[in-house]
Image (spheres, rainbow, N blue to C red):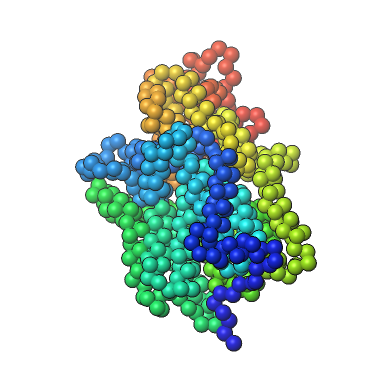
């Protein structure tokens, strides 16, 4: 007999009140999703980054508030084509996210609460809460178990990477929301074909791609989904068979329009080769050719560890079980979860960049759907122990924020510091990197704003700060934020070479700049990077001292009396911490 395309377990006795509610029509059916959304949003708002973030987050905040890509805004000598309309300098390179910038820019201007920085951060919180709600609704639609749905959505909501991106300015929460919205519309269309649902599915995917090109991996995900269906004994049923693909294609084109419009605007100023190369991340993709089998093994093991740390041990086990046997609960959702997980986990595994962990987030989203299937299967088999199973699921979700809060202290006690985990120091070491990256709770964290304001205020007149944008990402973006957005300290020059490929950057440029300027203005380094500043050469020519949370260079004859010149990284540090 052919296997059904979607088969759900019967709602367990303890689930029946919510099951009856959700199988109703109109507002009653939506109440469950809105309840999950409200709970998740409250959690994220209470742990939200209140002000300036670090690194890429600072860049996105600046771009959202100004409506300009940071690289294009820094190209003061470029002859841009006249364009009086908004977002004239919003690009489409791999690091540009047109839809996110447009939405966050609108939020920064229109939300009548908080600072502009806080409003930008709220966009992430709202999108992440919406994604968690959609995950809950999808799992319930295919399992009939409100308990399994809440467990899956709750585990996703408090998972480390998802939570981190929900309370900081990032594009991944919006990406997850739009991917799940597209999936929800497509899933309904498979059950009850309708052109409007195909249109909505295509629109959601197009908007997701306009936010981040990573969304386009949903297309090979569909191929994997279809292949999994052919492998089974049933007939693959899709909405396109009944109504064609035109509504989906039209919807995708409409959703992708912001990207296409910005692409056309960029082509008025730059040649197509200069636009399309960065648009697909060609610089990073070229690095795949140099990846060794050992690198891939290390990347795979890292992913497994990160996946385990996202979800509590029970959630991890249920997710694996759902990927393996979830088809016994719902064939369709099982194939969706498995295909999405395989495609996005594979991309993250191969895409070896400094923020590789971020590219796994969609894999975690699909894993949470599999966890919902596994939880529904377990609850159905543990009927006599159901209250205990529900308590264990709840405890697992609640325990993760507690564990993340304790993680920095546990890591320090185990002898792990910023360097071991690959967390770059900020200036002379003003940030607690373990606390920032291991604990997603950002409530009351004003560290980046404090560093930027105090450092700029303390710098002497006409100071020159060398902060190459790739190695000293945090320092460069934070200092430039206050200069570009608040017009703070225009006399200070922050040089980051944003238009120079960091992989071909020649440190002799930095040395020559120091040699040319040190007799005329105060010169500072954001870090003691040998790769980008040839600091061993500079230390042989000048006296390097800690000053204003940075490293100041003095000519030997001009060094302050009694100054202790640094000939090497400060005691207790090593090349990984300072010599980056």
Q: In which quadrant is the N terminus drawn?
A: bottom right
The answer to whether residue 205 is above or below residue 487 is below
Quarter of the image where one finds residue 580: top right
Q: Position of residue 486 (x, y in %)?
A: 39, 28
Furthest residue to the top?
Answer: 561
Furthest residue to the bottom?
Answer: 1
The residue drawn where x is 48% and y is 42% is: 122
Q: Position of residue 196 (x, y in %)?
A: 38, 67
Furthest residue to the left?
Answer: 82
Q: Position of residue 313 (x, y in %)?
A: 71, 56
The answer to whether residue 19 is above or below residue 111 is below
Label count reads 0
Side of 199 where 440 appears, left or right: right
The answer to whether residue 136 is above or below residue 548 is below
Q: Is there any visible trace of residue 291 in the rendered image?
A: no
The residue drawn where x is 25% and y is 43% is: 85
Q: Position of residue 281 (x, y in %)?
A: 41, 54
**471 vs 36, nearest the viewer:** 36
Quarter of the image where one finds residue 60: top left
Side of 448 where 515 appears, left or right: left
Q: Is there any visible trace of residue 108 in the rendered image?
A: yes
The residue drawn where x is 61% and y is 68% is: 143
Side of 432 where 555 appears, left or right: left
The residue drawn where x is 59% and y is 75% is: 7
């Amino acid at each position: 007999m052919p296997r059904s395309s979607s088969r759900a377990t019967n709602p367990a006795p303890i689930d029946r009140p919510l099951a009856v509610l959700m199988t109703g029509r109109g507002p009653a059916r939506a109440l469950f999703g809105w309840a999950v959304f409200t709970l998740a949003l409250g959690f994220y708002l209470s742990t939200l980054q209140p002000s300036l973030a670090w690194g890429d987050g600072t860049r996105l905040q600046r771009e959202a508030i100004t409506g300009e890509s940071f690289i294009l805004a820094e190209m003061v000598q470029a002859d841009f084509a006249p364009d009086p309309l908004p977002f004239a300098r919003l690009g489409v390179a791999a690091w540009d996210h047109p839809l996110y910038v447009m939405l966050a820019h609108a939020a920064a201007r229109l939300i009548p609460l908080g600072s502009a920085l806080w409003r930008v951060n709220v966009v992430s919180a709202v999108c992440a809460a919406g994604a968690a709600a959609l995950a809950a609704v999808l799992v319930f639609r295919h399992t009939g178990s409100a308990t399994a749905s809440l467990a899956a959505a709750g585990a996703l909501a408090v998972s480390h990477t998802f939570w981190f991106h929900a309370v900081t300015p990032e594009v991944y929460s919006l990406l997850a929301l739009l991917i799940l919205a597209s999936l929800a519309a497509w899933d309904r269309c498979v059950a009850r074909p309708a052109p409007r649902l195909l249109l909505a599915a295509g629109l959601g995917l197009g908007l997701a791609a306009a936010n981040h090109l990573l969304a386009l991996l949903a297309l090979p995900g569909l191929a994997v989904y279809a292949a999994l269906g052919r492998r089974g004994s049933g007939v693959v049923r899709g909405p396109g068979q009944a109504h064609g693909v035109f509504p989906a294609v039209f919807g995708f084109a409409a959703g992708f329009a912001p990207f296409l419009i910005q692409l056309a605007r960029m082509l008025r100023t730059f040649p197509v080769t200069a636009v399309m190369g960065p648009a697909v991340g060609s610089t990073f993709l070229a690095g795949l050719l140099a990846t060794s089998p050992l690198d891939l093994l290390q990347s795979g093991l890292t992913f497994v560890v990160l996946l385990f740390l996202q979800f509590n041990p029970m959630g991890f086990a249920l997710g694996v079980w759902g990927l393996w046997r979830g088809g016994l609960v719902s064939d369709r959702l099982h194939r969706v979860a498995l295909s999405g997980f395989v495609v996005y986990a594979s991309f993250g595994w191969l895409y070896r960049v400094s923020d590789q962990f971020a590219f796994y987030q969609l894999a975690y989203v699909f894993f949470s759907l599999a966890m919902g299937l596994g939880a529904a299967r377990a609850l159905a088999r543990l009927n006599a122990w159901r209250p205990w199973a529900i308590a264990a699921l709840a405890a697992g979700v609640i325990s993760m924020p507690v564990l993340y809060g304790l993680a920095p202290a546990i890591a320090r006690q185990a002898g792990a510091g910023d360097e071991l985990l690959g967390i770059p120091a900020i200036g002379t070491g003003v940030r607690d990197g373990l606390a920032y990256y291991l604990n997603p709770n950002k409530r009351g964290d004003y560290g980046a704003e404090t560093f930027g304001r105090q450092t700029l205020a303390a710098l002497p007149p006409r100071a020159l700060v060398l902060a190459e944008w790739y190695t000293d990402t945090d320092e460069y973006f934070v200092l430039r934020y206050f200069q570009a957005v608040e017009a703070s300290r225009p006399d200070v020059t922050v040089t980051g070479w944003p238009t120079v490929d960091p992989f071909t950057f020649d440190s002799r440029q930095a040395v020559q700049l120091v040699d040319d300027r040190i007799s005329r203005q105060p010169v500072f380094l954001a870090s003691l990077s040998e790769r980008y500043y040839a600091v061993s050469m500079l230390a042989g020519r000048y006296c390097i001292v800690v000053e204003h949370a940075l490293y100041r260079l003095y000519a030997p004859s001009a060094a302050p009396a009694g100054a202790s010149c640094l000939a090497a990284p400060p005691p207790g540090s090593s090349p990984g911490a300072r010599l980056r």
